Image (tube, helix red, strand yellow):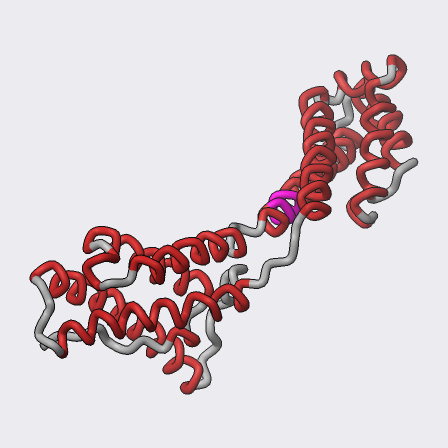
Amino acid sequence: MNKILKLLLYKLRNGEYFKFMSDFKSLLLILTPAAIHSEAEFAEFDTTLTKLDDELRVDQGSVLTEQLQNLDRDRDNAWRAVDMRIDATLLCTIPEEVEAAKSLRRVVDLYGDVRRLNYNEQTAGLTNLCGDLAQRENAGFVTTCGLTNWVSQLNNLNTAFVAKQNERDTVMANKRSGNAKAVRIIIDPLYELMVERVNALVSLNMQTPEIENFIIELNQKIKTLENIIATREGRNNSGEEEPPAPDDE
């Protein structure tokens, strides 16, 4: 007689746990909670699983931080490209372009290497620099040195950085701290109780073909998770460095 296998729920990472419980819910809805005499338990399980989903939603703060870092890298590179283009033009031996590069070099040097500044200082520096380069007395030099598109791109990236930083700050200000562990503690006994009900029906030889199919499909998911846990623990025991856990921990 097939019974539902034992799964050590505490060994599951939050993402694995939520996926498994969601799969369990889907299979039980097909079988129907009434088939295992667990309507009330399933209702509470379903409500609590929704709470867990709220706790484990993707951390938008982390995602936006990564996007912000990428934009900062891009604007650093854009500034460096402009800076190097000016240096290269100084060596070109075309008098008009050399003189234009000299004028631009004086403007850019007023702000120093903005990449070494913190986010807010760099933003302010690039905003002022791009504003200076757009001034009538400098715009011609920018054109002569072939930097019109590059300066425009630098300004666009700096503007995008500011917008992304504001977005992230808003998200972080409104972000509540999650407590997935407390929700899991509620779900665990509900799951275990419904599993006991299924296994009790099997012990009493009261299982239906639908229940048997439910057990087979659920056990396959349990075996998959057991393999994942075994691999993870084997890696830890061997002294190998485990890849970083996702942010759902």
Image coordinates of residue 156 in percent, x first then y, are: 69, 27
Image coordinates of residue 14 in percent, x first then y, are: 46, 64
Image point 13% across, 74% down: which residue? 202
Specify start and end residues of the magenta stretch as a single range. 64-69
Image coordinates of residue 245 in percent, x first then y, are: 50, 66
In-image side of 113 versus 20 (left or right): right
Image point 23% across, 57% down: which residue? 34
* Quadrant housing residue 232: bottom left
Tell me how many marks there are.
0
Image coordinates of residue 38 in percent, x first then y, are: 28, 62
Q: 148 or 193: which is nearer to us?
A: 193
Chief SS of the magenta region: helix
In-image side of 235 versus 244 (left or right): left
Inspect the magenta stretch and tell me whether residue 92 lies in it. Answer: no
Q: 126 or 95: which is nearer to us?
A: 126
Image quarter hosting the N terminus = bottom left
Q: In the picture shown, does residue 34 fall above or below 212?
A: above
Q: 235 or 76: which is nearer to us?
A: 235
Image point 46% across, 74% down: which residue? 242
* Quadrant housing residue 169: top right
Q: In the picture shown, does residue 94 fall above or below 168?
A: above
Image point 68% across, 32% down: which residue? 160
In-image side of 164 versus 7 (left or right): right
In-image side of 207 versus 24 (left or right): left
